Image (tube, grey):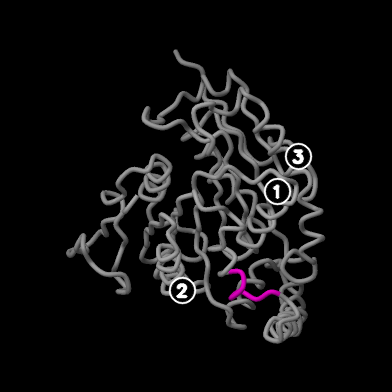
Amino acid sequence: MSPKPALRTVVDFQDLGQNIFLHKPEVDDAEALGSKEKDNLPPPSLVILCTWLGGATTKRIDKYIIKYQQLFPNACILLIRTTILDITFHSFRQIRAGLAPARDAICTILGDRDFVDDSSDDCVLLHIFSHGGCNTGIQLALSMRENHMPLPLRGIIFDCCPGDATFQKAYNAAVLSLPRCQPAQSIGRLALYPTIAAITGLQHFGVMNSVREMRAQLNDSAVFGTHAARLYLYSAGDQMVEWQDVQSHLKAARTQGYRADGVMFHSSPHCALILEDEVRYWAAIQNFWQFGDLWHVIEAPGPTAPNRDAQLGTASLLLRSKI
């Protein structure tokens, strides 16, 4: 009988401080888990997850890190959790300083030849969720470049992002981070409203970076480089980030020469695409890493599947891979 897979959850990860956690698999763990990886390209040496703001509970995050261990049992997993302070009060300088444990871990992993495949220079998969994850991912990439070690990214997954810069959506997203119990929920909402309003005003007048600037940074080669392919996972049922905003960013990425793909779900709420179709979600990620054809996982369920040559822009469109 084969040994039971040794899957790790967040509580089993090494706590590096500053809401940063690391899983570095042991040889026995990887062998017990086995590998479903395809033979044409090596698996990632490192998977980096930058979580969303609000609702990213340990239980929900566990669903992602457990599946990543099953897909890529030899990969290290670096988890960076986003907090409300990272969005509202912390400067970029403070955020980058707080990412020091992540930088140290990345340098250690990529410098350890047991965890880096010599046949590939691009060995990192970056998975960012919502605007909180976007902000963290950008600051991590820039801080790595500042330390003369750009991330060797092969792929970036944009999960339910990026959206637009409206006040209401920013407020709704921030509310998700509040305690659900009363009266903390009501008090938090009252405090958040003027805070988000002030931040929106500062962004409007150029005092703070806006979502518009963040969207531009995500397509800036000075941040993530030019080699990494992109996968956009998003939902028509997302009340925080509209599918049109995601598609417009995808189209802009393609226009700038990036290899970009998209998979749209139909009814999933924000940062919960796996609740709608977990099999399709993970098949898209696995095939994306292998630069495979996503069509068989992209095709929409229902009476009418989209035409393979359909143009971007309709609500039912699910993009065909061009990688």
- Viewer-side label of 2, 3: 3
Instruction: Quadrant for the N terminus, please.
Output: top left
Q: Is residue 95 left or right of residue 164?
A: right
- Report how far apart the C-alphas of labels 3 and 1 lie in the structure: 10 Å
Q: Of helix, strand and loop, which mostly describes the magenta segment? A: helix
Q: Amino acid at mark 1?
A: Met
Residue 255, how many percent across, how many down? 41, 66
Disc 1 target residue? 144
Q: Is residue 257 above or below residue 16?
A: below
Q: Amino acid at mark 2?
A: Asp
Q: Is residue 297 above or below residue 92?
A: above
- Report how far apart the C-alphas of labels 2 and 3 lie in the structure: 34 Å
Residue 29 quadrant? top right
Disc 3 target residue? 104
- Report how far apart the C-alphas of labels 1 and 2 lie in the structure: 28 Å
Magenta region, residue range: 209-214
Query: In the rendered structure, does residue 130 fall within the stretch colored magenta?
Result: no
